[in-house]
Image (tube, coloured by chain):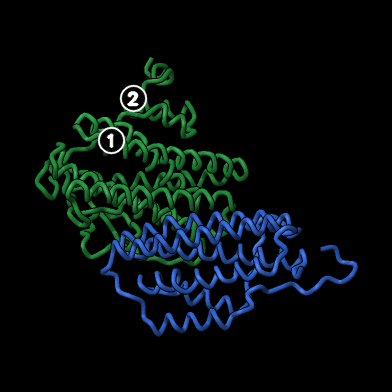
Chain colours: A green, B blue
Amino acid sequence: MTGVSFETKVVRGVTLRQAPAREPCFTCVDLDSEMAEWPDMSDMSRRERIHRHMNNEAGALEIAALCVSDFPDAPWELRMLLARQAADEARHATLLYRRLRELGGYKGEFPIANYEWGVTGMLENLPGRLAVQNRTFEAGLIDLLGALRNTWREAGDGVTADLLDGILADEITHVRFANRWIRQMTEQDPTVLLKVAMAVRFLGRANENVAIREGEVNAVGVPLKPKAAPAVNVDDRLAADFTEDEVKEVLRQAGFRSILPSRLAERASA
Amino acid sequence: MGLSIREKADAVATFRFISVYLMETLARWVPTTPELEVKVLFGRHLWDLAQHADAFGKRTAELRLGLHQSRRPTAAFMVVLETMAGAAGTPERLDGFFEVLMPDLGSRCRRYLDETDHLMDEPTVRILERVLADFTRMRRDREQLGQERPDLPTADRAWLERLRRMAASARDYVDFRPPPKTAEVV
């Protein structure tokens, strides 16, 4: 990727890529304190959750598409996987938009943020983007969706629960190909590991800067507190080609909380 | 029947170039197109174009040109591609791609099918038939989008007409390699 210029913005001292194009009906914000999220499963909260997820899938589509256009010299097989990922994310955004309308919602009903795009779009190399978007954000989504499908089912909405489970199956494949390609690229060129490390460091710094601060409330007056990491979806992370050691490390960071307990989770917490 | 192996290889490699170019164009348009319904349509279709490029690229190897070899089209056809890819507004992007480029490319695929021996060149024929079937579905998706978003304005007619005329005048799109000398292995 050479000679590509793009607009940036500074959010709490960290420089991020300017948001991708959105229709005027959307209000784009940068911080959790500007979002309108509710902790319950009221009708309003359900629509907001779907609305937020829909925009996140659109963002994932945009990041995959950006990788396709920014790295014409990447191996063809990897470009194919990114093109496929773009189509998957497009399908997810469409499915969620359809569900949003079924629940009486509409585009622009709630504020949206494009944080993942803002961070990943700043990275100038493909291994770095795969490490941040696929291996970190999307891997986090594996954990989140593993828990959310149960939340929705327990709230009596099996349709959304099934939809989220379908999305989860696709996300596993996106994380898996990133894991495999990063491994392969690192074997061919050990300096790739440095690019990955720098990308993850940038993400860590960005996360720190935008983290929720003491006493903050969001746009609808809900007090904010640091979100607990969702339970680790051990089996799906293994299916996404994380090594056992990597999953154990994530389990350790999450205080050994796991769903779908497997032999690994048992071993890690022993 | 008309086409030599070398000419077939050049044509298939050109189809690959065009497919990759269009895939990259849609990929560039995804983040810069505001309308969600259009954004996701481009996102789904760029995967179709990637699959076309992949099939053409495997075929170039079978035609002695090497795996995933692309061949840049003639200068006249490149201008058509670049003009379409330069569209900044959503209506021009939609109509330039679906109303001009795709039908034009479809007619070039059919012209190849008319010129080649369907038995001798059956693998290429099958690829082109699948591509044409995909184009039909993709244009149907575009029509569906029009029903979902009737508020989207239509493209600048003068620009569209100019693009159409450019495409019509760029009849030759394959930049064929010169014939080999007798001793050259092709």
Residue B83 position in % (x across, y down): 48, 77
Q: For the point 89% across and 70% down, which residue is it? A: B182
Check the residue under mark 1 and report the chain it is in: A
Residue A250 position in % (x across, y down): 38, 30
Pointer 2 with pointer 1, Cβ within 8 A = no
Q: Residues within 10 Å of mark 1 (few under 14, many from 20)?
A: many
Query: Under tag 1, what secondary structure?
Result: helix
Q: Report which residue position mark 2 lands on.
A: A258
Where B68 sits versus A141, above or below?
below
Residue B104 position in % (x across, y down): 53, 73
Q: For the point 68% across and 74% down, which residue is it? A: B175
Where B16 sits versus A190, above or below?
below
The amino acid type found where label 1 is placed reads: Ala
Check the residue under mark 2 and report the chain it is in: A
Query: What count of labels does the image hold?
Result: 2
- Which label is found at residue A48? none
Query: Under tag 2, what secondary structure?
Result: strand
Q: Is residue B59 left or right of residue B18?
A: right
Q: Residue furthest left?
A: A221
The image quadrant that residue A232 belongs to is top left
Nearer to me, A246 or B159:
B159
- Which label is found at residue A161? 1
Mark pair 2, 1: CA separation: 19 Å
Q: For the point 22% across and 51% down, which residue is it? A: A101
Image quadrant holding the N terminus of chain B, namely bottom right
